[in-house]
Amino acid sequence: MEGSQKKYRISVLLDMSNSSPFVLTSAVELAKKIDGTIEVFHVKPTSHIIKGDSQLSAIRSLNQDDRSTRAKLKELISQVGENENPPISYKLEYGNVKHRVRDYLALQKPDILVLGKRRPRLGMFFESITDFVINQTNNTNVLILGQDDKFHSFEDINLGIFGSEFEDNDLEVIKDLKRDSEKPVRHFGIASESESKDSSYPWHKTVSYKFSKGANALDGLVNYVSRTNTQLLCVPKKGKSLRFGSSPIKSVIKKSKVPLMVLAK
């Protein structure tokens, strides 16, 4: 392989919906910012392909779909990342979506997984896959992009962090996202969370916003994140600051109105 080795391995989980070009474009911009390689991963449920009751008919359907899907993937990759170096690779698999995604993550162990989040009224595919992916990963950061996000560049990003319990690896990713930027990182937290008052972070400047503890604390915090023009909110997967209910991560994902990076344990 020519050139120096890239720092991050980025996988992009695509469902080939209308939002896929945006998701892949955002992943390309992320790779440029933090020095990463990109691989696209797409799963086709076989139950949606196999038609007819004969084995020969099933094989023909699968072969036809395989050619068509690979052509669409190559076309999308060409449109979005034609000049990327190294080139964007892809993997196409068939079967149960959750099972294939689980096996892919276990085998490939990407540093960052990028995926889109659909609105509930448009279907539950990525709603359930998002929860599933976060439950399956410990060492992979998960970047979740909403369909309505107008966010393509990571240059000079308005970055926010939520909570206080960040691991060294978390801080490393955030530092790379803020590289060459003089903008402060916005820290959002709940007033009663157990956090040292003199907490310091390895970047230029941090501006803190504290919210009073209460039943609506998370709603108020999430709404304020949008009002501050924060472009990406980083949330640690594990930490006392996330204990707002039975499934705090799920609540943050559902309520967040900006792109979200769920940081690995």
Image (tube, rainbow, N blue to C red):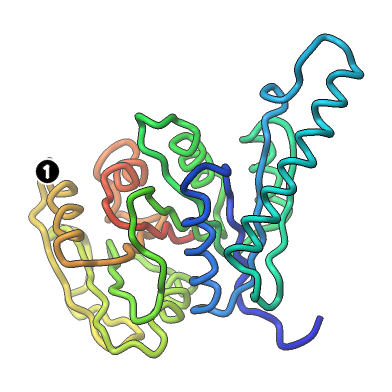
- Residue 222, percent from left and from top: 20, 53
Q: Is residue 153 above or below residue 245?
A: below
Question: What residue is shown with label 1?
Answer: 216
Q: Is residue 40 left or right of residue 168?
A: right
- Residue 116, percent from left and from top: 46, 48
User: Looking at this view, is 161 or 78 the one in front?
Assistant: 78
Residue at left offset 43%, top offset 37%: 127
Residue at left offset 26%, top offset 84%: 183
User: Looking at this view, is 212 or 10 the one in front?
Assistant: 10
Q: Is residue 68 left or right of residue 30?
A: right
Q: Is residue 93 left or right of residue 138?
A: right
Residue at left offset 62%, top offset 78%: 7
| Element type at mark 1 | loop
Q: Is residue 17 above or below residue 226?
A: above
Determine which quarter of the picture holds residue 64.
top right
Residue density around tag 1, few if under 14, some if 14–19, many if 20 or more, within 10 Å: few
Residue at left offset 48%, top offset 45%: 18
Q: Quadrant of the N terminus?
A: bottom right
- Residue 50, percent from left and from top: 76, 21
Q: Amino acid at mark 1?
A: Asn
- Residue 193, percent from left and from top: 20, 59
Q: Is residue 56 above or below residue 66?
A: above
